[in-house]
Image (cartoon, helix red, strand yellow):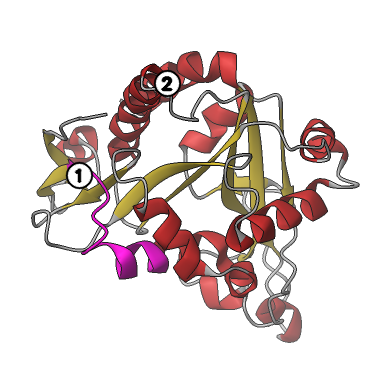
Amino acid sequence: MGKRKQDLGDVPMGGTKDEESSDDDTDMINVDFEWFDPQPAIDFHGLKNLLRQLFDNDAQIFDLSALADLILSQPTLGSTVKTDGNESDPYAFLSVLNLQEHKDKPAVQELIKYITSKAAGNPSLAALSELVSQEPIPPIGLILTERVINMPSQVIPPMYNMLLEEIAWAIQDKEPYNFSHYLIISKGYEEIESKLDLEESRPQKKTKKGGAANQRFFFHPEDEVLQRHALCSGSYEFTHKQDDGHSDSKRAFQELGIITNGSMILLEGSKFEATVKAVQEYLQ
């Protein structure tokens, strides 16, 4: 199952062309992004750090080293994005793991247990709860993807398009990647009233118009499209709670504090290609 990554040209970091033309003070940095196969000899620490960022408060639950090794054990499936050649650290990655195929591996057993516990009792994730409770677990493709915070979302559609091609090639080679469903683990956040404002003697600041408390936001804009095409999707609280001051530590550029939470999006396998196309159209 062979493939070639390609340099898809300059992608602006820090704004759009419209923003650049409307504000002469905005500095634009054009960076050449390159897409590579995961490299077992190079990418271990970079992938582990991105996995830690993805799972946030609950990263300590998982054997991230084993998960990184598992991703790297299938180097012709999935992508990394780099800016300084193949020998540099990845700034983004996307890969898929077959939960059925790897169900006996301890690291995947931890993932399945976690998914099952977060979906159980959550009405918005009822379809997922029913699916993962089956014996044996169906051939679910668990999509793991993360990127550093300032990476532009335009790097995402090429990774999903490459994944579609790679899965098609793998199925032709009789490899176990014919998935009944795809599950994306991601994360979002809610804006909450700042505890600092509550403690001060001045009147409390009003929330932004249209920014009511408990409104759900996504760190990854493509999640908005993915959930619209999903069989089910929902957020959940992390097992390991944030301390009281954590939300205020993330409010440097806004009046409200934020609290992060996990997110799961379940897609039917037959609708995955159309969903990828929708993501591309949304982010282009």
Q: Mark 2 — residue?
A: 171
Residue 9 location, quadrant: top left
Marks 1 and 2 in Cβ contact (< 8 Å): no
Q: Nearer the viewer, residue 86 or 76?
A: 76
Query: Mark 1: which amino acid?
Result: Phe
In the rendered view, tell whether residue 280 sits above or below residue 138. Answer: above
Q: In the rendered image, which quarter contains the C terminus?
A: top left
Please name which of the two marks, 1 or 2, marks the residue nearer to the observer. 2
Element marked by disc 2:
helix
- Which residues make up the magenta segment? 35-49
Residue sitting farthest toward the front = 174
Please report the residue visible at 65 percent of the width from the left and 25 percent of the height from the top.
230
User: Does residue 206 show up?
Assistant: no
Element marked by disc 1:
strand
Q: Mark 1 — residue?
A: 36
Q: Nearer the viewer, residue 119 or 195?
A: 119
Q: How many marks?
A: 2
Q: Position of residue 26 (x, y in %)?
A: 17, 52
Q: In the rendered image, which quarter contains the N terminus?
A: top left
Q: Position of residue 212 (x, y in %)?
A: 72, 49
Classify 10 Å Cα crowding around label 1: few (below 14), some (14-19), many (20 and above): many
Please report the residue visible at 39 percent of the width from the left and 44 percent of the height from the top.
94
Query: Mark 2: which amino acid?
Result: Ile
Left or right? Give the position of 284 relative to 244. left
User: Does residue 5 show up?
Assistant: yes
**In whole angstroms, how far apart are the C-alphas of marks 1 and 2?**
21 Å
Please report the residue visible at 42 percent of the width from the left and 61 percent of the height from the top.
68
Residue 213 on the magenta segment: no
In the rendered view, tell whether residue 254 sits above or below residue 4. Answer: below
